[in-house]
Image (cartoon, rainbow, N blue to C red):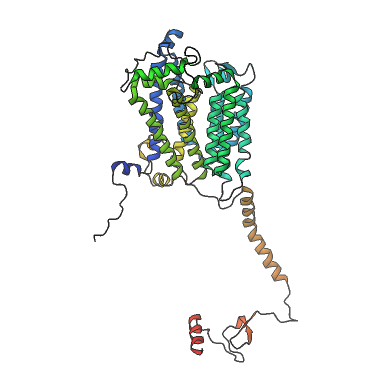
Amino acid sequence: MRPEKADSGPRTRIGTWLARPLTSFHLVVTIAFLLTVLGLVMVLSSSSVESVAADGSAYGKFVSQLIFATLGFVIFYVALLIPVRLMRKWSLWAFGATVVMLVLVLVPGIGTLSQGTRGWFVIGPISLQPSELAKIAFAVWGAHLLATRRRDRQSLKEMLIPLVPAAMIVFVLIVLQPDLGTTISLGIILLALLWFAGLPFKIFLFTLGAGALAAVTLALTAGYRSARVQAFFDPAADPQGIGYQARQAKFALADGSFFGEGLGQSRAKWSYLPNAHNDFIFAIIGEELGFIGAAAVIGLFGLFVYTGLRIARRSSDPFLQLLTATATAWITGQAFINIGYVVGVLPVTGLQLPLVSAGGTSTATTLLMFGLVANAARHEPEAVAALGSGQDGRVSRLLRLPKPVAYVPPRLGAPRQRARAQQRIAAAPQRAQLSQGTRARTPARTSAPARTPVRQTQRGQQEPRGHRGRVPGSERGRATPPRSARSGERGMRR
């Protein structure tokens, strides 16, 4: 038989490239760049007709989206520079600030009402949606909280409190706007945190069922949300009313066929499909780029799922594991919900397609989340070793990124225990000096001889343990034979 060849690693070019230490980082950067550029192109194409009718220029909404995308890439770069330690240190304060913003946006005169939702701060030409910031702050703080309490046998109370009550507060504030789509996104983040933190399966199913029941209740309480659910189950009931938008989206996808009508050649954007540049931009992609373009978008999000879970699996820091896996579940979950209601398999919820739909705050905050995931990719053990040895790569050298710090697991659990241990270590020399001084001042006892521990000999006699090897009655001792020799001698005697 011929000896089997040893496994020399990946044998294909793709396998060799995936085995490189910075592959995850390059994948995240590439996916974020491609989705953002595709979004800019499709926003220009889908909003040009509406922008001409409103402002007289075809570039109105495109310029706004370009400004926020540029700001988003700046935030992406800043997220790459944030140390993990500072990220965890300021997570609670950031989450508290977003909760205050969610309260203020509900105040008339401070928050702006748009499309039936009071969820924006408008300052001149700039609008800010605090609920988008709240999702990121909650994800980072939740990952920090669960990673701090993570151990082999953590109680259910430590896992759920205060994470779930804090989420309930944010849920209530967003429902009061009201904004069902953002509420669903926050629910995805909460479920992902609990799932990847190791919540028992039965408790997770109960939480998932409670969340689904709450979503159905919210969908049936408001008039427009209830109408959307009814239109989903019976699309022909009101084709010119509440079901018009979803119906026109299907027509646009059908017109695209396999290769599409061509970039810029959509007919649905000529006021046939409302919000073509926002919630239903995937329908315009399918119409202009066809099945190939739509499949490419789905493939990019699928590649992001692989990359995010790869980073979470290869990371050694529990915080980065939870944060990366949660961000992956949130972004891809929101993407496939958007695609699902465009193609007609889910009711319309108003969730945007990340990095592709028009929306300044959504684009900037999603790029911030991609930056945090890319930061986690640079903290993989293989990436830290490669960057530490000078294998920076073109992207890292171009961006002048600092070298990441390797994760060191804490030896002691709580900060108070670490502080007490440091105090004991610092006070150890002083205690040793005090004990030596006490011994020097203590007078020697001469009244009674010191008690010496004794051991039993082979003949049943006791001899001092300090005089080991000495024969009773002799003045000079001899060396004690090795243990093996003594055991052999006993065997011979037997």
User: Which residue is the extreme one toward the left?
Assistant: 2
Vertical comparison of 385 with 373: above or below: below
* Residue 375 image point, x, y percent: 46, 38
Q: Is residue 60 left or right of residue 109?
A: left
In depth, the one of 212 and 109 nearer the eye is 212
Picture quadrant where residue 116 is located: top right
* Residue 422 image point, x, y percent: 62, 53
Vertical comparison of 221 with 468: above or below: above
| Residue 100 can be seen in this image | yes
* Residue 73 image point, x, y percent: 44, 28
Q: Is residue 419 left or right of residue 41?
A: right
* Residue 236 image point, x, y percent: 47, 16
User: Which residue is the extreme one toward the bottom?
Assistant: 473
In depth, the one of 453 and 294 nearer the eye is 294
Q: Is residue 375 left or right of residue 139?
A: left
In depth, the one of 462 and 425 nearer the eye is 462
Vertical comparison of 90 with 261: above or below: below
Picture quadrant where residue 39 is located: top left
Image quarter hosting the N terminus: bottom left
Picture quadrant where residue 282 is located: top left
Vertical comparison of 306 with 180: above or below: below
